[in-house]
Image (cartoon, grey):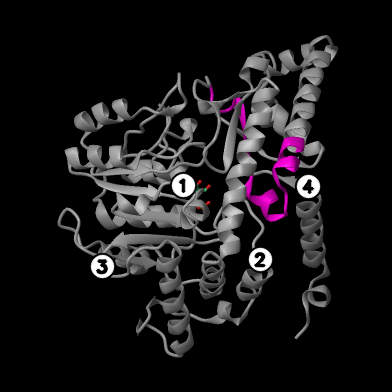
């Protein structure tokens, strides 16, 4: 058996290039992180060879004595890492990632076309929370269920709970989803619990982005108020790519969540668990109980605050005016540029972040902002001083974007771009001739 360099130099070389890119750039994508060598060792192990459909002790394949031990250990560590009482809560560690975990919850507790409400994607929510446009049901969640997104109050950048309450009373969802992909503040769980109770809905938190912060208790604890908590495992939690679903053990609204959710994962939507991922996750959840992990998560938040205050000093408008977690959302529209251009220019300088829509954007195709996260560079050892420097680099990148826009606006290129965008020039017609 050969190692990768010998067996496939082409793939080896791509991996080497990607590794160099990761190590040489300033990685500021809020959903990314650098997992540990120990996690990667587990993920790259023989655990990938084994089929184990079912749950520990109840498998459809033989030879699972060690896999049972592993999955049970992973479940125990998951409950410990989030300090939840194993008598009241259970967990499924098999979801292949965050979107499947969410869809598994929906199919567990809803019937096709039941109603749900999640934060709208252009306001920071995730696709899997039911995204749709006026023209198209984009996400599977909005295709198979009836979705009515709630939104932010555009004047404050905070979730508009009053509007959520009014809409919930009219729409009567069976499920309300807290959690986001681009929201720099905590959710008001007591308020959302009250709203869910008033309409007889389940309350679920998708803590994918902030699960590391939740484990370290540096943000509010969703387990106190929610019936179900889902998460990815590869963002602030710093584990392998995967997902988890936590559920209350006592029935909620007459539903036995434990069996409904376990059955939705398998055989409902998945087959064999990815045991190599479960191995890596168990390692990650051990790290997550260490004092070093807590210190790391505290630094993620303080670094993000330092970044936010430097950007504010430089005159930038931040959605909600700042951040209580691991990300900031910068509204670039007051400067007259969009997030896509800034992302591109910063990419050329090896500063990796992403364009992001901001409340009030006219089109999702031209997002007006950028999202900047602190987890990955905090893992690389950066502290507040370096995050202030990052704000200054981003500022320089934005200045260059503005300069590029100014240069283009006085050039023939501008005329050309207008021509390409005009009805006189339809590339599709020419191609299809
Ligand atoms: N939920 C939230 C809040 C997310 O931000 C994401 C991913 O960005 C997901 C779910 C989906 O996770 P995955 O990409 O693993 O399917």
Dot 2 or dot 1: first in sequence order is 2
Which segment did they paint magenta? Answer: 363-389
* As drawn, 430 above or below 285: above
Q: Nearer the viewer, mark 4 or mark 1?
A: 1
Q: Is mark 4 within 8 Å of ligand 1?
A: no
What is the x, y in percent for residue 392? 77, 31
Q: Quadrant of residue 117?
A: top left
**Dot 2 and dot 3 residues touching (CB under 8 Å):** no
Q: Secondary structure at mark 4?
A: loop
What is the x, y in percent for residue 59? 37, 82
Q: Which residue is mark 1?
A: 219
Residue 25: numbered disc = 4
Residue 136 falls within the magenta-colored stretch: no
Cα separation, mark 3 vs mark 1, equals 30 Å
Q: Which residue is mark 2?
A: 36
* As drawn, 266 above or below 396: below
**Dot 4 and dot 1 residues touching (CB under 8 Å):** no
**Dot 3 and dot 1 residues touching (CB under 8 Å):** no
Residue 259: numbered disc = 3
Most extreme residue toward the left is: 254
**Dot 2 and dot 1 residues touching (CB under 8 Å):** no
Cα separation, mark 4 vs mark 1, equals 28 Å
Q: Nearer the viewer, mark 2 or mark 3?
A: 2
Q: Measuring 77% from the left and 19% from the top, which residue is drawn there?
A: 402
């Amino acid at each position: 058996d050969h190692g990768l360099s010998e067996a496939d130099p082409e793939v080896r070389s791509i991996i080497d290039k990607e590794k160099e890119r990761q190590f040489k750039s300033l990685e500021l994508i809020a959903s990314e992180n650098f997992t540990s060598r120990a996690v990667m060792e587990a993920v790259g192990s023989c655990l990938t060879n084994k089929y184990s459909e079912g749950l520990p002790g109840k498998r459809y394949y033989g030879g699972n004595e060690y896999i049972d031990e592993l999955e049970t250990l992973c479940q125990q560590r998951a409950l410990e890492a989030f300090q939840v009482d194993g008598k009241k809560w259970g967990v499924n560690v098999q979801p292949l990632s965050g979107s499947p975990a969410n869809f598994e919850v929906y199919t567990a507790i809803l019937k096709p076309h039941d109603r749900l409400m999640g934060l709208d994607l252009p306001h920071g929510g995730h696709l899997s929370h039911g995204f749709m446009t006026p023209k198209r049901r984009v996400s599977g969640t909005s295709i198979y269920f009836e979705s009515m997104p709630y939104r932010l109050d555009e004047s404050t950048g905070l979730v508009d709970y009053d509007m959520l309450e009014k809409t919930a009373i009219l729409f009567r969802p069976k499920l309300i989803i807290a959690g986001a992909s681009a929201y720099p503040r905590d959710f008001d769980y007591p308020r959302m619990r009250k709203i869910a109770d008033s309409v007889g809905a389940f309350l679920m938190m998708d803590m994918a982005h902030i699960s590391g912060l939740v484990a370290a208790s540096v943000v509010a604890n969703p387990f106190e108020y929610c019936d179900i908590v889902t998460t990815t495992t590869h963002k602030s939690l710093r584990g392998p790519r995967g997902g988890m679903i936590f559920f209350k053990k006592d029935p909620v609204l007459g539903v036995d969540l434990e069996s409904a959710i376990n059955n939705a994962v398998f055989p409902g939507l998945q087959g064999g668990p990815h045991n190599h991922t479960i191995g890596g996750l168990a390692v990650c959840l051990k790290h997550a109980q260490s004092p070093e992990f807590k210190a790391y998560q505290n630094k993620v938040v303080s670094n993000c605050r330092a970044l936010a205050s430097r950007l504010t000093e430089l005159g930038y408008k931040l959605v909600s005016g700042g951040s209580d977690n691991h990300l900031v959302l910068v509204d670039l529209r007051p400067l007259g540029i969009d997030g896509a251009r800034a992302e591109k220019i910063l990419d050329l300088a090896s500063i990796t972040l992403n364009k992001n829509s901001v409340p009030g954007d006219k089109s999702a195709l031209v997002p007006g902002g950028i999202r900047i996260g602190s987890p990955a560079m905090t893992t690389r050892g950066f502290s507040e001083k370096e995050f202030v420097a990052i704000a200054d680099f981003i500022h320089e990148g934005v200045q260059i974007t503005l300069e590029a826009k100014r240069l283009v606006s006085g050039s023939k290129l501008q005329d050309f771009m207008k021509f390409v965008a005009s009805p006189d020039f339809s590339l599709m017609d020419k191609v299809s001739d």
